Image (tube, grey):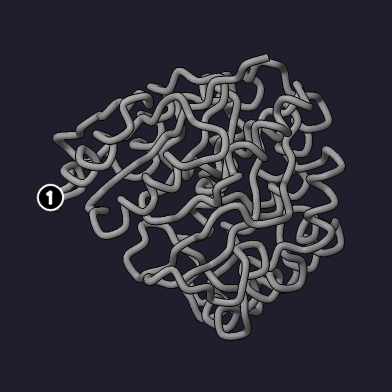
Amino acid sequence: MIVSVSVALCTYNGAAFLEEQLLSILRQSMPVSEIVVSDDGSTDETLAVLERVVAAWPAVNVVVLRNSTALGVTANFEQALAACSGDLIALCDQDDVWWPERVERMVTEFTRRPALQMLHTDARLVDAAGAPLGLTLLQTLGVSEADRAAVHAGHAIDAYLRRNIVTGATMMVRRELVERSRPFPAVWVHDEWMAMVAAATGLVDLVDEPLTDYRQHGGNQIGVTTLDASGKLGRLRAPRTARNARLLARAAALQQRASEFEPAVSTSVLALIDAKLAHETRRSTLPAARLLRVAPILRGWRTGDYLRFGLGLQDLLRDLVQPV
């Protein structure tokens, strides 16, 4: 069976790294059939770089969408994904580098497993010059063995409801998942939303090895957030109101849409999503006074919600000490 692969590439003032990324796509061991570029109003040489590089590769169909008004990351990716015609769609950032076998490895998995809706992978972190930083993406995010095992066992929804572990730059999806996920809620990031929809309605999996160099250069629109000791301490000091409102809005949007998905979401997953919304509602309404938070937080701990829908003791401590 011949499978066509589209690349959804979003750009914004990405001239510095775009050529290297484009060449890594064009030189894949399994060629892609289409690259859809959605440019969000670049004012640098991004589009000139694009035209120069792809001119030497006439066999690849390149579609360029130019936004006169910036859409933002999520809406821009939704536009790019919707314009793709391939059976499979690989999401792509403008500043990374794909390993030569990335497309072939991922297509092989989709071909072998017709039920698979989404696949994501690990990535090697590199600096602006492309030098390895000695860590992978999943290591930096602190993805546990339990989370990996849940995804591999077909229970990705359990892992994703705790926290997002999917990065769009490592994703490949079936085109029907894009249609099922649209319109993307404004309160969600595109990759997190599609991952959640995929896990709620079908099968997803994770390739534990890197297939991408994920560049960290200080200008990333969405980069890696570390979960080391200093990062955790910073979270405890950060005000809680905006973050908790965002988590509640996301849970509410998911709960509202989940009953409309096709194929239908199982009653057990719907119940889990309802419980997630209830948990985030309780968290968002905790009193400003820390002492008054103790009783409702302990009730949440006893019901197991901090472990089912978050990082356990880390989130409990965050709710207990974060300033409003």
Q: Amino acid at mark 1?
A: Thr
| Mark 1: few/some/many CA within 10 Å (<14, 14-19, 20+) | few
Q: Position of residue 218 (x, y in %)?
A: 35, 71
Number of numbered markers: 1
Q: Which residue is mark 1?
A: 43
Q: Quadrant of the N terminus?
A: top right
Q: What kind of element bears circle 1?
A: loop
Q: For this view, does 298 lie left or right of residue 139?
A: right
Choose between 5 and 44: the one closer to the eye: 5
Q: Position of residue 209 (x, y in %)?
A: 70, 56
Would residue 96 appear left or right of 306 to someone viewing this image?
A: left
Quarter-wise, where is residue 157 in the image? top right
Q: Residue 25 placed where, x, y %?
A: 45, 42
User: Can you say whether 67 is above or below 2 in the image?
Assistant: below
For the residue pair 14 and 186, the one nearer the viewer reads as 14
The structure residue drawn at horizontal position 72% and vertical position 25%, both measured from the top left corner, is 111
In percent of width and height, residue 48 lies at 16, 43
Residue drawn at x 76%, y 23% is 115
**For the point 83% across and 48% down, which residue is it?**
150
- The answer to whether residue 298 shows anywhere in this view is yes
Q: Nearer the viewer, residue 29 or 115?
A: 29
- Whether residue 30 sits left or right of residue 314 in the image: it is left
Task: Decide: is 286 above or below 167.
Answer: below
As displayed, is residue 306 above or below residue 320? above
Q: Residue at x 35, y 23 (%)?
A: 61
Can you say whether 65 is above or below 221 in the image? above
